[in-house]
Image (cartoon, rainbow, N blue to C red):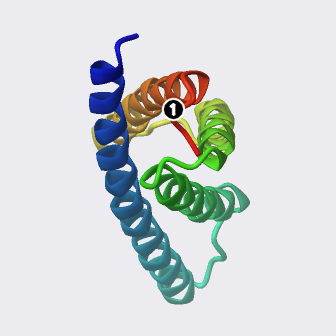
């Protein structure tokens, strides 16, 4: 691949890294809010949160942390971004496989949310491919 094209891909990767830092932090904020609301609803209803919902909450925390970490490592084009992107891809795949059985969508809003999560996973895989390409081309330090 030509050096000019690789230079452009490096700048795109830096932007993607910054995007994932922000996205990961927003995911962590959403996880915090969901945790608070789950506890409040459990207190009002007098029923504990289901194990599946608690696990869903933990997957949001871990996914947000992995996304933030991957973005932090990609923005300066560090080799460690490869491991972070692959780990998060595996985490997302495992979540989607588990959620399809344990938390099937029950209404249109759930189906839309699952579709968006699946689409985000596909985009993550494409960006993981970009990270692997940059690594293979010696552009990560």
- Residue 10 on image: x %, y %: 36, 36
Up/down of 23 relative to 1, above or below:
below
Residue shown at 57% from the left, 63% from the top: 65
- Residue 125 on image: x %, y %: 50, 27
Q: In the displayed structure, does residue 102 sit left or right of residue 74?
A: right
The picture quadrant where one finds residue 112 is top left
Up/down of 5 relative to 44, above or below:
above
- Residue closer to the observer: 28 or 36: 28
- Residue 74 on image: x %, y %: 48, 49
- Residue closer to the observer: 102 or 137: 137
Q: In the displayed structure, does residue 83 sit left or right of residue 39?
A: right
Q: In the displayed structure, does residue 102 sit left or right of residue 134?
A: right
Q: Residue furthest right?
A: 51
Residue behind mark 1? 131
Q: Residues within 10 Å of mark 1 (few under 14, many from 20)?
A: many
- Location of the N terminus by quadrant is top left
The picture quadrant where one finds residue 137 is top right
Residue 107 appearing in the image = no
Up/down of 45 relative to 109, above or below:
below
- Residue 73 on image: x %, y %: 54, 55
Q: Label 1, secondary structure: give it.
A: helix
């Amino acid at each position: 691949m030509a050096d000019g094209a690789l230079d452009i891909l490096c700048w795109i990767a830096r932007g993607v890294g910054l995007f994932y830092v922000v996205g990961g932090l927003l995911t962590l904020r959403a996880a915090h809010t969901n945790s608070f609301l789950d506890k409040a609803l459990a207190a009002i209803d007098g029923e504990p949160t289901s194990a599946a919902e608690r696990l869903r909450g933990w997957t949001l925390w871990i996914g947000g942390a992995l996304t933030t970490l991957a973005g932090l490592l990609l923005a300066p084009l560090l080799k460690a971004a490869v491991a972070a992107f692959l780990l998060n891809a595996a985490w997302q795949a495992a979540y989607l496989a588990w959620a399809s059985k344990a938390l099937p969508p029950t209404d249109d809003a759930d189906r839309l949310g699952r579709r968006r999560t699946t689409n985000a996973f596909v985009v993550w895989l494409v960006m993981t491919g970009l990270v692997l390409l940059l690594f293979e081309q010696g552009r990560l330090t």
